[in-house]
Image: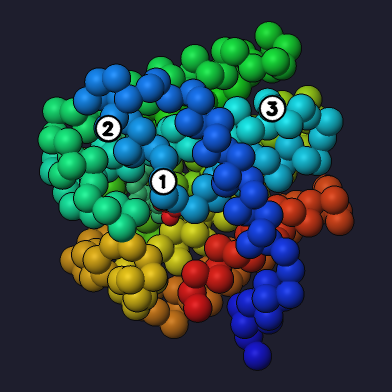
Amino acid sequence: MGRLQQSLLILKNNPFAGRLCAVARDVELVLDNILPPRTTQLHEAMRYSVLGGGKRLRAYFTWASSQLFDVSHQDALQTAAVIELIHAYSLVHDDLPCMDNADIRRGKPSCHKAFGEATATLVGDALIPLAFQTFSSLEATPEVRLELIKELGHVIGSQGLVAGQMMDLGQEGPRSTLEDLSEQQRLKTGVLFGFAAEAGGILGNASPHERRALRSFGLLFGKSFQMVDDWLDGCGDEDAIGKPCGQDNEKFTFLNLLGPTLLYQKAEETLEEALKALSPFKERAYLLREAAVCALHRFS
Ligand code: GRG
């Protein structure tokens, strides 16, 4: 039996699913409060894009990393919600015709299909400042709030998500080797997972060493997650993942570079590396370890 299958057996007997549901529900309540009421088409579209769907894995990472420290429940949930606002923005913009041109997201019409391109563009534009505004009003000290704001700016800017998107669109950077693809995916997917995991540490005044460990865990998890996403696009079940498969057949993806068998093996190795990164926290990091194993559960 491979390590992945062993991990899946462990999952069947652990309470991760219940924990994820509980955190997702709490974060959705916070998001519901943060988002403006449905008074305009723009607000309606913002709520459509953020609420009612999504696994809330990044939010879970933030909550789970905050549990390693003495962090208020309210600040942990607000910070987790901020990360989901940013994630939702990135999906709305990524789905636009000028980007990945996707009609379906989370099993329903993507934002621009439901509300039009201009509104979808503005939904993304409005979610970003809402995220920063939310950070500015946490209960945490001004130093902690400023650090979160600074790091988020870095992670989503022209040396983070946006750079990854430029590379993904083929507008920038080399596109031939596994290293090229890993760098593209680190920026497009990894850095937000890295920030999600580190954010609990920032809230908890973690040491630089602890913050690096959390970030590194999130980055490696993000890489294995993207590998799984590529695998699912080529080999998965459309109904289970809520979007059409085979859309990336012609693209620069881990599946097309490695093929399904090697990709599976690499995803496994990357997960192991992610788990190792948590070693400074020893057994205390069990919530994050459990969540990381769940990423590969999507293989089943
Ligand atoms: C800057 C315009 C712009 C976009 C940023 C991050 C990004 C670039 C685009 C996101 C699109 C994308 C498909 C990224 C790959 C990561 C990924 C697999 C996202 C889906 O994440 P899940 O599965 O989604 O966690 P849910 O719906 O569960 O929240």
Percent of width and height locating residue 132: 49, 18
Residue 245, relative to residue 188: is it above or below?
below
* Callout 2 secondary element: helix
Q: Amino acid at mark 1?
A: Gly
Q: Residues within 10 Å of mark 3 (few under 14, many from 20)?
A: some
Q: Residues within 10 Å of mark 1 (few under 14, many from 20)?
A: few
Percent of width and height locating residue 185: 41, 50
**How far apart are the two marked residues, 2 and 1, measured between alpha carbons?**
12 Å
Query: Which residue bears the numbered disc 3?
Result: 74
Q: Which mark is residue 45?
A: 2
Which residue extends farthest top? 142
Query: Which residue bears the numbered disc 1?
Result: 52
Q: Which mark is residue 112?
A: none
* Callout 3 secondary element: helix
Q: Residue at x 68, y 80 (%)?
A: 9
Q: Residue at x 22, y 25 (%)?
A: 41
Q: Residue 144 or 160: which is nearer the viewer?
A: 144
Q: Is mark 3 within 8 Å of ligand 1?
A: no
Q: Amino acid at mark 3?
A: Gln
